[in-house]
Amino acid sequence: MKCRVCGQPASISLRAYNTALCADDFVFFLERRVSDTIKKYHLIDKDDTPVVAVSGGKDSLSVWHILNRQGHKADGVYVDLGIGEYSRESLEKIKKTAETLQCKVFVFHIRNTFGRGIDEIAKATRRVPCSACGMIKRYVMNKVCIDKNYNVLITGHNLDDEAAALMGNLLYWKEEYLWKKSPLLEGHEGHLSRKVKPLFLCSEREMAAYALISGIDYIYEECPFSLHAKSLTYKRILNSLEENSPGTKLQFIKGYLKMIKGTEEAPKNITYCSSCGYPCYGDKCNMCRLLDRFHIGNKIDFDVYG
Ligand code: SF4
Ligand code: ZN
């Protein structure tokens, strides 16, 4: 198998595109795909001040790397969930990447604020860990944007993540989420930052190959709470469809993007938290309620590395 561009031996076959590429041409291809997505969906402008939500995994560290290579000077933000070795190793990889990129990373340690990890917070509040985690992450990452003057939050969601989420929303007809899967979510000036997903059209396999070829040192283990997630089942089903009919995932997401016309508007009819100003649907946001629940003042501190 030869590289479609240069004729040298190919390193990766991309059946969805009916092509094969060598390592160098694959890196060029993937980075181009990211910059085309950014341009086409107006995700990041040259005057923007972006910050990347990093987890230590291949997608978020790769998108951080790509954006900085493409001249979007982006810092990072990480929420340390306090899950033993998994969280420690993730933070090490993130600090190392920050150093390589010569960027800052803001770190919120859940244990420092709450005196317990995400699993104990979830138990005490009768939520599942992923629900407590999602709420805290959304809040903390937005707070970094608002307090530290970053106007756009970048996430590393890839094509497989988006296709699996869309499949789940369709299967259960979750109409409240169904039309809210776009590469760009507008913010609320001074309260909620814009969120964008530059890897929306890059598959999990492509991102793993990119990280490997580019020498990005990421954590291979998944979060222990992800093991029974329904999204993994949907990903397996979508991969088997992809195996039989290459390009299925891409068509699924591209067709969806055509229907929603690219942009998701910020939620309407919302109020702002009386304590912290975060958008919410009642008097107080869920994060302030959680802080109240554990009798903690509403002071959210970050460590800064880099
Ligand atoms: Fe958070 Fe882990 Fe659940 Fe992902 S799998 S939402 S990181 S607790
Ligand atoms: Zn609040």
Image (tube, grey):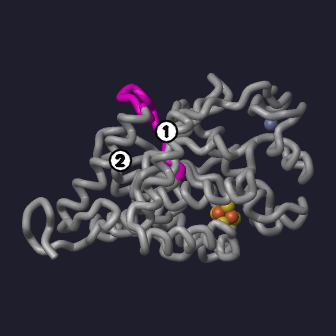
Q: Above or below — where is 14 with respect to 194?
A: below
How many tags in the picture?
Answer: 2
Q: Is residue 57 visible?
A: yes
Residue positioned 59% across, 34% down in the render:
264
- Local packing at callout 2 (Cα closer than 10 Å; few below 14, some 14-19, many 20+) is many
Residue nearest the observer in this picture, 8 or 111: 8
Residue nearest the observer in this picture, 193 or 79: 193
Residue at label 1? 258
Amino acid identity at mark 1: Lys
Residue at label 2? 34
Q: Main secondary structure of the magenta part?
A: loop
Q: How far apart are marks 2 and 1 (CA)?
A: 18 Å
User: Is 9 displayed left or right of 154 in the figure?
Assistant: left
Where residue 205 sits in the image (x, y, percent)? 40, 68
Residue positioned 39% across, 26% down in the render:
47
Amino acid identity at mark 2: Val
Which quadrant of the view contains residue 288?
Answer: top right
Q: Is mark 2 on a helix, strand or loop?
A: helix
Q: Can you name the residue that lies furthest to the left here?
A: 7
User: Is 300 displayed left or right of 124 in the figure?
Assistant: left
Mark before the other along the chain sequence, 2 or 1? 2
Residue positioned 60% across, 40% down in the render:
144
**For the residue with label 1, is its CB less than 8 Å from the closest atom of ligand 1?**
no
Residue positioned 58% across, 30% down in the render:
186
Position of the N terminus, as image quadrant, is bottom left
Where residue 56 sits in the image (x, y, percent)? 50, 63
Span of residues in magenta: 42-53
75 drawn magenta: no
